[in-house]
Image: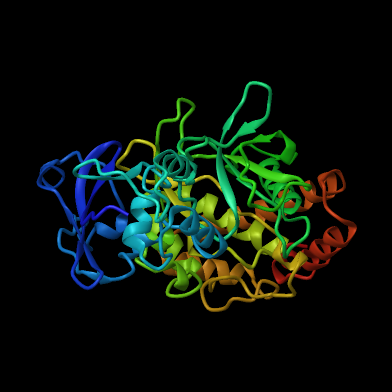
Amino acid sequence: MSDVQTLQINLHDDPIGTLTLLQGDKSIFAFNDAYLEDLNRPTLSLSFKDEFGELITQSRPTQTSLTPFFSNLLPEGHMRDYLAKRAGVKKMREFHLLWALGADLPGAMTVTTLNNARWDIDDETQDTELKDDKRRSVMRFSLAGVQIKFSAVAEAAGGLTIPVDGLGGSWIIKLPSRRFAGLPENEFSMMSIAKRMGMDVPTNRLIDPTEIEGLPEDVDGRKEPAFAIERFDRTMSNGRVHIEDFAQIFGVYPRDKYERATYRSIAKVLWIETGAAGVDEFIRRLVFNTLIGNADMHLKNWSLIYPDRRNPEIAPAYDFVSTIAYLEDDFAALKYARQKSMKALTLDELRLLAAKAGAPETLVTRAVTDTIDRFHETWRAENKHLPLTDKMRNTIKNHYQDTALFKGAD
């Protein structure tokens, strides 16, 4: 790879700072003067705001890993392994991985070099044309998470095409899981119910892999349906809308996404930053995911979006899956207020969550009761029309009927 020591950080295509690689594989981020002096500057992250709402301008170097805000832009698990291998990067060296994937990151941030240096594949071949082909084939986008997924462009005929260079695309394709059968069907079903209940859910559908052009030959998942969902961080004209997840907001590394925060602390940020509308939507999603038995709503599965570039709103819903259909786990990814048991969750626990977050208890009570009513009505009307196995249906039904929250609504 090229000997690059400084990366330019761009937000909405404007340079706002630099990320510099120091001796000993350390790195440090700094805002540039123009961004600091701009009183109408776009928001990069709430994690760069102090308790008084002022911009934090000083940061400390980090070793090997980048700071949590930048580290959370990168994929995890199998997705990281796959993209790091294609880019010829060691997966733990986040500075170089961010450079390799920085042309199409989540949100409106991109990463370039100051001297327009090209990313070079670690390849001993001397065939320049072959190197160029491999360079173009690197999937230069970073979709945070562990599941193998790709960004794709919608075609007029209804199919989806994965760009050959990995750049662009307003849809995300999630391929079937080797470990969990019917995962795309599960997510499609849960998202469909949530949308019918009135939650903010992006357009999504199941798609036959044969309708996906450009799917790399070295990935599995060509025989079963894939889950496709429209990206809410992209516009119809392929413009970028900035987003950040709550691991970034709280300064938590991806490995700690199940720790160091609670649903109460998410609600507190939402109350301060988005008011009643954000908290109402949050509570509805929290109750819904409790009822379907989703034990994986960790910090990275909640995000803020910046439609006007400065002020946040709660981002549309994503990653709604009934995990109890696969694993007998009653514990939520994070604490509600005092406890994590989904079956033991009560209205009183959610009222306490609201009180500690500074939000009105009446707002939460109304959102909880309305969501339970809508869920019960929608589930009874729609579940048999969704692509779920009978075992999944029965598991979800038995779970939600056994929750204290649902029983308390009787």
| In-image side of 117 versus 300 (left or right) | left
Q: Position of residue 189 (x, y in %)?
A: 74, 48
Q: Position of residue 333 (x, y in %)?
A: 57, 70
In the rendered image, the residue lying farthest to the top is 156
In this picture, is 127 found above or below 56?
A: above
Toward which corner of the image does residue 62 lie, by quadrant?
Answer: bottom left
Task: Give the residue displayed 41% in from the left and 31% down from the top.
Answer: 239
| In-image side of 375 versus 256 (left or right) | right
User: 274 or 109, which is in the foreground?
Assistant: 109
Q: Note whether residue 240 is visible.
A: yes
User: 231 or 383, which is in the foreground?
Assistant: 231
In the rendered image, the residue lying farthest to the bottom is 339
* Number of numbered labels in the structure image: 0
Toward which corner of the image does residue 404 lie, by quadrant?
Answer: bottom right
Q: Position of residue 213 (x, y in %)?
A: 64, 34
Q: Note whether residue 207 is visible.
A: no
Toward which corner of the image does residue 123 lie, by quadrant?
Answer: bottom left
In this picture, is 245 found above or below 192?
A: below
Quarter in which the C terminus is drawn: bottom right
Task: Give the residue displayed 50% in from the left and 66% down from the top.
Answer: 263
Quarter in which the N terminus is drawn: bottom left
User: 285 or 213, which is in the foreground?
Assistant: 213
Task: Give the residue displayed 57% in from the left and 78% down from the top.
Answer: 339
